[in-house]
Image (cartoon, helix red, strand yellow):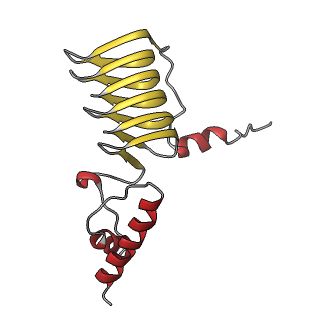
Amino acid sequence: MTTEDQVTEQQTLAAGAAGAAGIVLPTGPLLPQLAALQAGQHRQTDGHASSGELVIGRGIKVKGQIGACKTLVVEGELDASVEVRSLRLLEGGVFKGTAVVQDADLTGRFDGRLTVTGRLRLSPSARVSGQIRYRRIVIEEGGEISGDVAALSAQPDTAFEAPAAESAAKKPSRVARQ
């Protein structure tokens, strides 16, 4: 039996068990994905995904808490509490919940609590509502923001500095005694 036959047989068995449980599984050949995983390769969204990037794709709905990624890209629907370095909410994407980020580039719809310690950019199709805090903001013509909106103080935020800077700040200083 070839690997392709084995994968097809496994898909058929899984689909039967899932169907009995009322779960709908995606269809289509899994062999290319399986071969890529066995080779240690990972599919990258439009060829630009990088380490530390999480993509919530179009048609995907996710609920929960996210905090272990550098960049969060939302094309689908996300109902969550997140703390990431960069948030990209793409056109058609919907975010409901709480987000604390360094930079946010919004094209979709955000509803909730948003704190941006760096730059918040709203594109012409962005719709943002809720409690919004930002250090710097750019609203392109057509972008909309409503709710409790206020600028953060001018103090720079250190929550997202590189780990090397954090460890250097934690080292005790030595004072020479005479």
Residue at 48 percent across and 38 percent down: it is 63
Residue at 41 percent across and 67 percent down: it is 16
Residue 173: quarter of image: top right
Q: Return the residue nearer the eye: 174 or 153.
A: 153
* Left or right of 68, for residue 88: left
Q: Return the residue nearer the eye: 57 or 162.
A: 57
Rendered location of residue 113, percent (x, y): 48, 21
* Residue that sits furthest to the bottom in the current view: 1
Quadrant placement of the N terminus: bottom left
* Left or right of 175, for residue 50: left
On screen, residue 55 above or below 94: below
Rendered location of residue 151, percent (x, y): 44, 12
On screen, residue 92 above or below 167: above
Residue 77: quarter of image: top left
Residue at 44 percent across and 54 percent down: it is 22
* Left or right of 9, for residue 124: left
Q: Return the residue nearer the eye: 8 or 178.
A: 8
Number of numbered discs overlaid on the protein picture = 0
Q: Return the residue nearer the eye: 12 or 47.
A: 12
* Residue that sits furthest to the front in the current view: 20
On screen, residue 18 above or below 92: below
Rendered location of residue 101, percent (x, y): 45, 31
